[in-house]
Image: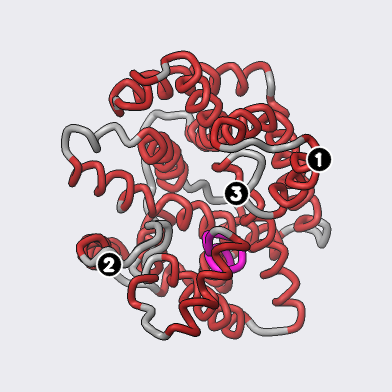
Amino acid sequence: MTSAKTHQYPAVDVMKFVCAFLVIVVHTYPFYEVWPDLGFVTSNILGRIVIPFFFISAGYFMQIGRCHKDENYFRSYIKRLIKLYLIWSVIYIPFGMHKLGSMMEISGALWLAALPIALFNIGTYFHLWYMSALIFAMVFCHLFLKKFSMKALLILGGVLFLFGLIETYHGLITNEILLQSVNTYFLLMFTTRNGLFFGVLFVALGMALADQNRVEAIRHPFAKAAAAFGLLVVEAFTVRHFHWALDYNMYLMTVPFTLYWFAGLLRTRLDWKLNFKALRESSTVIYFCHAMFLELGEILLGSLYLTNGAVRFCFVFPLTMIMTAIIRKWLPFLK
C-alpha cells in the first residue's frame, strides 16, 4: 500500500466522469418515451452503479489519506466536504423551494422547520442527499474503526445494506406487522437511500480495499465484475417484472459489481493524453450543478420539457458542461 500514496488512478478518474454523465441521464431519462426498456437500463441499472462507485472511491482514498498523512487529515477532509455541502445547499434553497412549492403549499414557519431536516437527510434539493450521506458514512466508519475491527464494520455495513433493500424488495413483505413498521419508517424517513443503510457498506469496502493493498489480492476483477453485472441486470428486471420495488435505488448485486469494478480500475493504467485531474474535478462539479438546469428547464420550457426526455437531456447536458467550465476556471470554491 505504500505505493498507493504516489500512484495516480486515471481509470478511476475517467469512471467518475462517466458516472457524472450517467447522473444527468438518470435525472433526464431521455429514452423512456421512445424505448422504455432502454430507459430502464440506463436510468435504473447503469445509473444505479453511480452512487456506490462514488462511495467506494471516497472510502478508498480517504483511508489512504488516513494511513499516509497526519492525524488531522480526516478532520480536514470532512470539514472540506461539509463546507462544500453547505455552500451548494444554500445555492439550491430557491430551487428546492420552487420544486416543493409547485407540489404543495408550505408556510414560512414550515420552511424554517424543514431546512435543518433537509440538511441532515435529503438535502435542500433532491440530489444533495448524496453529500449528507457521504459525510455521515465517512464519520460513522471513522469512529467505528476507533473501537472495532474492519471485519466488524463490513459485517455491520452488510446488515444495514440488507435492511436498506426493503425499499427495492418491499413487495415481498407479507407479514402485516412488519409491513406496517416498514411503511411507518418510509412515512417518516422517505427512503433507505441514505448514509446509514446505503453509504456505510460501500465506504467500508473502499477502506478495506485500501488496507494492506488488498486490491492486488483480487484476481480477474473485471471478469468477476462482468458476471456480477449480468446478475444485476437479471435482478433489476426481476424486481420490475414482479413490481416489488418502491424505488430502484439499491440492488444486492451492486455490491460485488462495484467492488470488483473499482478494484479493476485501480489496477488499470491509461496512457491517454488527457487531463485526468480536470476529469476528476469536472465530475464533482457536474454532479452539483446539473440539477439547477433540471429545474430551470421546467420553468422555461414547460410541458415540452416535462414530456420529452430528449429535450430534457439536450437542455440540461450542454448547460451543465458550460457551467462546469465556468466554475472550474472562475469559482474554484465550488468544486
The structure residue drawn at horizontal position 37% and vertical position 57%, both measured from the top left corner, is 248
- Residue placed under numbered mark 3 in the picture: 129
Range shown magenta: 191-200
Q: Is 99 or 230 nearer to us in this picture?
A: 99
Residue 260 seen in the figure:
no
Note whether 57 is above or below 239 in the view shown. Answer: above
Query: What amino acid is at disc 2?
Result: Ala
Q: Quadrant of residue 210?
A: bottom right
Indicate which disc, 2 or 1, sits on the residue closer to the N terminus. Answer: 1
The structure residue drawn at horizontal position 55% and vertical position 42%, both measured from the top left corner, is 127
Indicate which disc, 1 or 3, sits on the residue closer to the N terminus. Answer: 1
Q: Is 61 or 161 nearer to us in this picture?
A: 161
Residue 172 seen in the figure:
yes
Please state which of the two labelled residues, at mark 2 or mark 3, is closer to the viewer. 3
Please state which of the two labelled residues, at mark 2 or mark 1, is closer to the viewer. 1
Query: What amino acid is at disc 1?
Result: Ala
Asked whether the residues under the numbered discs 2 and 3 touch, taking CB atoms below 8 Å apart as contact, a structural biologist would say no
Magenta segment, prevailing SS (helix, strand or loop): helix
Indicate which disc, 2 or 3, sits on the residue closer to the N terminus. Answer: 3
- Residue placed under numbered mark 1 in the picture: 109
Asked whether the residues under the numbered discs 2 and 1 touch, taking CB atoms below 8 Å apart as contact, a structural biologist would say no
- Residue placed under numbered mark 2 in the picture: 228
Q: Secondary structure at mark 3?
A: helix
Note whether 312 is above or below 218 in the view shown. Answer: above
Q: Is 199 one of the magenta-colored residues?
A: yes
* Image location (x, y in percent) of residue 134: 62, 55
- Marks 2 and 1 sit apart, C-alpha to C-alpha, by 48 Å
